[in-house]
Amino acid sequence: MQRTLGIIKPDAVAGNLVGKILAHIEVAGLSVEALRMVQLTEEQARGFYQVHQHRPFFKSLLAFMTSGPCVVMVLKGDDAIERYRALMGATDPAKAATNTIRALHATDVEKNAVHGSDGPDTAAQEIAFFRAALSRWA
């Protein structure tokens, strides 16, 4: 059983897509182990996305991720990381496979509805980050 971090981003929350995205995840056979709606502070967003701090889109990413609430969740299942990444689709929704979350619900590369860990080490770090930053899941 593998765990991965998923985030339903502010654009999808504002678009009332949380239920649809969760249904997509569950139909794909992944389980939600933990879930919490949060409003990220700039400090939390900066810490979480520090890997992108030198990229030109960093400030825009911080502004977007702090623009409204998001849903942070731990997903689990066999090959959860790979399966969730396939379910999300390409970062650019124009390049995302049909019926993926991003093809169905994303607006553009930045407002792409969801985030998912890209590997086991990242998943462990991201889950730990949110557990520490948010204290409790429920």
Image (cartoon, helix red, strand yellow):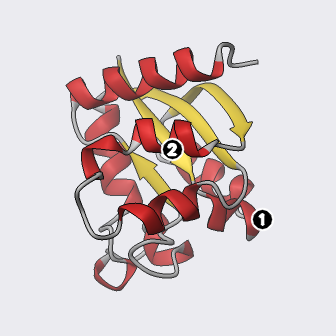
Which residue, given by chain and number where applicable, does mark 2 sit on? 45
| Badge 1 element | loop
Q: Residue shown at 53%/15% (left/top)?
A: 132
Q: Mark 2 or mark 1, which is nearer to you?
A: 2
Vertical side of 112 occupied by 36: above or below: above
Going by the numbered disc 2, the residue's amino acid type is Ala
Tell whether 91 sits left or right of 8.
left
Q: Which mark is residue 136?
A: none
For the view shown, which residue lies furthest in the bottom direction?
A: 94
- The image position of residue 110, as x and y in percent, is 44, 71
Q: Residue shown at 65%/60% (left/top)?
A: 10
- The image position of residue 113, as x and y in percent, is 53, 64
Pointer 2: residues within 10 angstroms few (<14), some, or many (20+)? some
Q: How many marks?
A: 2
Name the foreground residue: 97 vs 6: 6
Tell whether 79 sits left or right of 129.
left
Pointer 1: residues within 10 angstroms few (<14), some, or many (20+)? few
Which residue, given by chain and number where applicable, does mark 1 sit on? 16
Tell me the quarter of the picture where residue 83 sits.
Answer: top left
Q: Residue shown at 72%/57% (left/top)?
A: 68
The disc, 2 or 1, on the residue closer to the chain's N-terminal end is: 1
Q: Residue shown at 43%/17% (left/top)?
A: 128
User: Alpha carbon of mark 2 to alpha carbon of mark 1: how far?
Assistant: 22 Å
| Viewport quadrant of the N terminus | top left
Tell me the quarter of the picture where residue 64 sits.
Answer: bottom right
Going by the numbered disc 1, the residue's amino acid type is Asn
| Viewport quadrant of the C terminus | top right
Vertical side of 35 occupied by 138: above or below: above
| Badge 2 element | helix
- The image position of residue 65, as x and y in percent, is 56, 56
- The image position of residue 32, as x and y in percent, is 58, 30
